[in-house]
Amino acid sequence: MEQEKQLAKLGLFDAKVPRYTSYPTAPHFNNDVTPDTYKAWIEAIPTGSQVSLYVHVPFCRRLCWFCACRTQGTSTLSPVAAYVETLKDELKILKASLPEGVSLSRLHWGGGTPTLLDAPMMEDLAGAIFDVAPMAKDGEFSVEIDPNEIDHTRLEALAKAGMNRASIGVQDFDDEIQKTIGRIQGYDITRDAVEMIRAHGVKSVNADILFGLPHQTQARITESVQKLLSLSPDRVALYGYAHVPWMAKRQQMIPSDALPTPQERLALFETARKLFLWDDYDEIGIDHFATKTDGLSVAQRNGTLRRNFQGYTDDTADVLLAVGASSIARFPQGYAQNAPATSAHTGAIRDGHFSTSRGHTFTDDDRLRGRLIEALMCDFRIDAEEIVDRFDISRAELNEMFSKVMAQFPDVLALESGALVVPLEARPLTRIIARAFDAYDMSKAQHSAAI
């Protein structure tokens, strides 16, 4: 109880802070990054590099009420087929600018619902991607899979194309909660999907589950987590539901009075967290869990864990390319985002150029603060020696930054051998502490909720 009072005093239950999957975060992108900027950044990739590629499919058979992603519903495959043709054309434009010898360390299909594509579309799209760049020898090809929207034929196509990691959205297995959030997906359907995935030789399975949902209690989340653990996922993301009905209109279907209080949200998280730890999963950052042999656990032990738009990653590529409407690419030079609207994106590609509509060019200060925030989010510590070696900052200047942040969180942070450390009991505050290094005043951003 005393710890809860301290966390409350420091703003845990009131603050609205970003998830810091990028720095600066997307609300602070601007229009200075253009298609020509994006093209120049692609052309500057060193020959023979390994890069990552994200492919966005913004279509769903049904629109779940809880989801705040930019998606659109469709009852037929006609718009999906047309969109795949646009992706293929975009990949041709990408190939024309990409230096020789580039390969893919990571390939991820996200959405939306990528498994809405039928098998021939999947084969066609995979072929177009690998015509641009092959997978690296130890590359990882992952796909977000909706258990309600998958079958043997589509899984066979994905496995044949090289998919070696699947990501399953679970959210919660409770019937009442599923009805309230507009996501009907029983345990049996999910179990069958996981069994199908593994039967096709895909050994690595991720799962997403949410806390903070309407009508969710500690007993209910316990039951859902235990059901999920029975499927033996290799990696789990335990995300907090962000209720932002002023941004995601479909969330207006969810009754606000059925949502848990901030204090109850913390209890839900801790309940789920303990269950994963009891089942011998490693705790990764603020909201992921992984088996001892999973890439995230290995990266955490090696000090190579990173943060990207999907959350935590073991991918160390300097470049993340992105195709599809609203997708965001990352380069050493900055971020570039495609036009969010499918129509605008398609129009640009038909005109023969990228649809880049906004982004951000990094300053030296951005790179410094981005690494400070990433280190906190991944390792709960900032190593002063690493920062001074990598960036144009003196030890005295860095110590001054540390002192200012420590003053904001008295008796919370610690200095250990020159490193700023977030103790275990203060880790629920990590995002709030990270915000103290954010020069863009993200305290005013309302796009994400605190724990």
Image: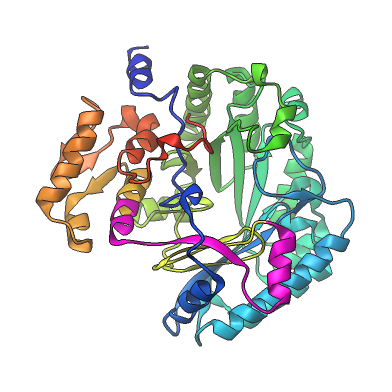
In the rendered view, would you say 196 is above or below 40? Answer: above
In the rendered view, would you say 332 is above or below 68? Answer: below
Residue 173 occupies which quadrant of the picture?
top right
Position of 361 compared to 77: left or right?
left
In the rendered view, would you say 445 is above or below 147? Answer: above
Which residue is pictured at 81% across the width and 62% down the height? Answer: 80
In the rendered view, would you say 258 is above or below 208? Answer: above
Is 356 within the magenta? yes
The residue range painted magenta reads 341-370
Is 424 within the magenta? no
Closer-to-camera residue (198/179): 179
Closer-to-camera residue (273/388): 388
Which residue is pictured at 54% across the width and 47% down the height? Answer: 235
Can you see residue 199?
A: no
Q: Residue furthest bottom?
A: 100
User: Can you give x and y, in whole percent of width and height, for residue 247 in the image?
Assistant: 63, 38
Position of 104 compared to 197: left or right?
left
Can you see residue 268?
A: yes
User: Can you give x and y, in whole percent of width and height, for residue 313 in the image?
Assistant: 47, 55
Q: Quadrant of the N terminus?
A: top left
User: Can you give x and y, in whole percent of width and height, for residue 375 in the image?
Assistant: 32, 49
Q: Residue furthest top?
A: 1
Which residue is pictured at 73% across the width and 75% down the height? Answer: 350
Which residue is pictured at 37% across the width and 34% down the height? Answer: 432
